[in-house]
Amino acid sequence: MLATKETRRLAILGGKPAFSQPLCVGRPNIGDRQLFMKYISQALDNRWLTNQGPLVVEFERQLSRFLRVKHCLAVCNATLGLELAIRALGMQGEVIVPSFTFVATAHALQWQGITPVFADVDPRTHTLDPHAVERLINPRTTGIIGVHLWGRPCDTDGLRRVARKHRLRLLYDAAHAFGCSHRGRMIGGFGHAEVFSFHATKFFHTFEGGAITTDDDDLAARIRLMRNFGFAGYDDVVYLGTNGKMNEISAAMGLANLRSLGDVITVNYRNYSRYRQGLAGVPGLSLIQYDERERCSFQYIVVDVDARITGIHRDRLVEVLHAENVIARRYFWPGCHRMEPYRSLYPQASVHLPQTQNVADRVLVLPTGTAVEEHQIETICDILRQAIVDADAVRRPLGPDPLSGSTVDKEEERALVP
C-alpha cells in the first residue's frame, strides 16, 4: 500500500477542507506595482489612452526584441489576433486544427465561415500530429493551425514539411508558449505567423490582450491595417478592417510584467520542481515534463492520470480536489469536436480522434504561479496520494455523462481509459 504523510480525513469523505480559500489554476501574477502605476500616470498625463499610443509602441518594440522577430503587433485579445491572422493569410475553405485546444482556436475559423477540420494529436506531446494532418488534406484545404501546448512546441519541422508540400498557410496558436524556445529559437518566429495570448490567466499578461508575430513584412502591413479599421493615415481607409487595438493601460501592465518575467519563471520552476518531488512514485500519476535545455515558463502543472493504476478516474480526482478547495482543471475537455456547434456540424469527427479523446479524459491541471506557496503544493500532493490510498472509499458512481447520458459505475470507472 502507498504510504501517505497526511492521515486526516479527505473532505470528500466528510473531513475539513485543506484550504479555507479556493486555490485556482491561472490566478493572475502581479508584477512590479510601482512601475505599473508609473506607466499609468504617464498615460494619464499624456491623455493618450488608445490608438497606438507610446506605451503600446514601446511594448511592441520590447516584445519584438525579446522574441527575436521582425514584427510584433499587439492586439486587444488573442482570439481576435487569430481572426486577423487567419484573414490576412487568406485562409478559406477548410483549415486543419487540433481538437485538443481551447475552443477559440476553432471559433476563430468558424466565425469567419471557414471549416475547422479536426486532426488527431501525438499522445506523447499532446500537439498536432503531422501525419494525421496530411491524411485530412483535400482540394478545399488552405491552411494548418498548430497549437503549442503547455509551453511545449509543436512538431514544427513536420508541420512545415506538410505545409510546403501541399502549399498551405501555416499559423501557430502560441497562447501557452510565450517566453519558451524550441531548439534554441524563441517561439514566435515559426510558420507564417504566431499568435500569443496575454489574458490575465497566463503567467505573463496584460489584463486582456495578445500579439501577432511574424517575419513577413507584407503580412505585418496587412494586419496593421486590419486591426485599425483599414486606416492607412488620417481619413484614409484603404482596407477592410476591424477594431483590434491594444489600449495603453494593457500595455502598461505588459511593460511592468516584462520587467518581472524572470522572477515569475523562477517561482514557476520552483513549483514545478516541488510537484515533481511530491508526486514522484505515486502510482498512476505522471507529471508532464519540460525540456530544461530550452527556455520555458513552467506555467502549467499537467498530470496524466491512468485510471487503470490509480483505481480512480481523473474526473473523480477533480471532485476530490475541489472538495479541498483546490480548483484543479480538466483542460480542453471534452475536445472542441464534442462542443457546439462542432458536435452537431461534424458528428463523425471523433472517428479520426482516438488520441485526442484519450488525452482529454486523462489530463489534470494543478494550481501554480506566484499565488501558490511550497507548503500548499505539498498539501496538494498529499491529497492526491491519500485519494489513491483510499481509492475504494473515494470511488463512487460518477453519474450521467453529460454527452452520452450513460452512467459510469465504480467497476466500470477503471476501464474508462483504454
Image (cartoon, rainbow, N blue to C red):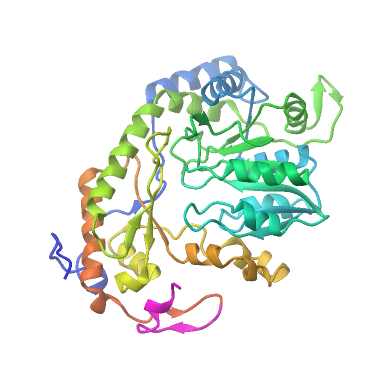
- Residue range of the region highlighted in magenta in the rendering: 404-418
Q: Which residue is drawn at 39% across and 37% down?
A: 29
Which residue: 55% across, 79% down?
Answer: 404
* Viewer-side residue, 190 vs 321: 190
Q: Where is residue 334 in the image (x, y as percent from the top left)?
A: 53, 65
Based on the displayed image, in which of its 4 quarters is residue 33 positioned? top left
Residue 211, how many percent across, how many down?
60, 33
| Residue 398: x %, y % from top left | 40, 78
Residue at image position (37%, 47%) is 289
**Can residue 10 be seen in this snapshot?**
yes
Is residue 417 depicted above or below 57 in this figure? below
Q: Observer-nearest residue: 356 or 31?
A: 356
Instruction: Examine the residues drawn in magenta and state their main secondary structure.
Output: loop
Residue 411 inside the magenta-drawn segment? yes
Assign the C terminus to one quadrant of the image. bottom left
Position of 6 relative to 73 (above/below): below
**The N terminus lies in quadrant:** bottom left
At x 46%, y 46%, the residue is 150
Could you tell whether 129 is left or right of 241 in the image? Answer: left
